[in-house]
Image (cartoon, rainbow, N blue to C red):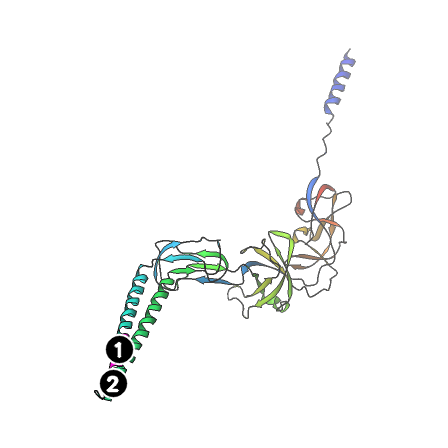
Amino acid sequence: MNLKYLALIWLTLLVGCEKLEQPASPPRPALVMVVGAKAAANAMVLVGEIRPRYESSQGFRIDGKIIERKVDVGARVNKGQVIAQLDATDTRLSTAAALADVRAAESGYALAAAELERQRQLFAKKFISASALDSREAELKTASARLAQAKAQAKVSGNQTQYTNLTAGRDGVVTMIRAEPGQVVEAGEAVVKIADTKETEVVVAVPESRMAEVKLNAPVIVKLWADRQKTYSGVVREISPSADSATRAFNVRVTINDADEAVKLGMTAGVKFNQQDERQTEEFLVPTTALTVINGKKLVWVIDANNKAQPREVIAGQFREDGVLIASGLQAGEKIAIAGVHTLIKDQQVKPVVETAP
């Protein structure tokens, strides 16, 4: 009886000690890239800002008080379109006074002309001297000069009235405006900026150590950060003759030849130089995030045919703006992890999510 009881207890203990089999964890997603062709030699990629080639600041040509603003920032305007207006009360009064002066000068000229004609008739009959006739002719010339002066002043006053309207100097988009009703502005004060969107450029700062690689009119490739898959062709239009005093870099302007609606002012863009150099190195270009260091060894994580992560020692070459060159340890067509490499372990099952190579 005791033996049966002890056997039952022993069997119960054995069953209770058995470990339940844990369910297998699902594969971890991993961002990977396929190692592509050999990297281009000494390719330089710099980041810049999209700017218009032409952007002008405009202001009123006379002093005055703004009474109306017709556009907002971002509005597209055509050349000659009214942007803002000044109070034209004083300029209209000045124009009216100038026109009155013109009429008075015309009356004076008509009187001097009639008087000269009478004096000429009297001179023909020998009733007056030549000196008296000369005096009337001088009065006519004076009246003519006064009339011309009054007309010129009237034209200036008329122009002043037209200057109360601020009009767009070119087709484009309004990028800045500081004109509000009630604001008093001075002549020449910038109240609006208009950018020509027909020609857009990328402005990049090139380090002085790499200025030898930038050539005027050289072809380049432009990529927007908003859409890394699409490329645009460009050309180096302008190279600053002097370095910026703060950054010690040279500003280079690159014209985008085939810009479309996706290219907007102020966007960030990458410019790839050295398109004329078709030489290939014996190295592969990978993102810097794919490279890690373990126990002093530089490694990348290769995803094998079974979707398992395998560490592989590599020899790293030059670090560039667009990644790092791997001199040996990789083969074209292999998949490598490019994000979260510090958390991978050997033989870890992953679910590859492929990203296009740089």
User: In this orientation, which residue lies closer to the viewer: 347 or 334?
Assistant: 334
Outermost residue, top side? 1
Which residue bears the numbered disc 1?
A: 114
The question of residue 72 being in magenta is answered with: no
Indicate the position of residue 298 as horizontal and vertical percent values: 70, 53
The secondary element bearing badge 1 is classed as helix
Give me the disc on residue 133.
2
The question of residue 115 being in magenta is answered with: yes
User: In this orientation, which residue lies closer to the viewer: 45 or 3?
Assistant: 45
Q: Main secondary structure of the magenta part?
A: helix
Outermost residue, left side? 127
Q: Earlier in the sequence, mark 2 or mark 1?
A: 1
> Are there few (<14), some (14-19), or many (20+) residues within 10 Å of tag 2?
many
User: In this orientation, which residue lies closer to the viewer: 73 or 317?
Assistant: 73
Q: Quadrant of residue 132?
A: bottom left
Q: Quadrant of the C terminus?
A: bottom right
Image height of 111 relative to 18, above or below:
below
109 to the left or right of 324: left
Give me the disc on residue 52.
none
Magenta-highlighted residues: 110-121
> Are there few (<14), some (14-19), or many (20+) residues within 10 Å of tag 1?
some
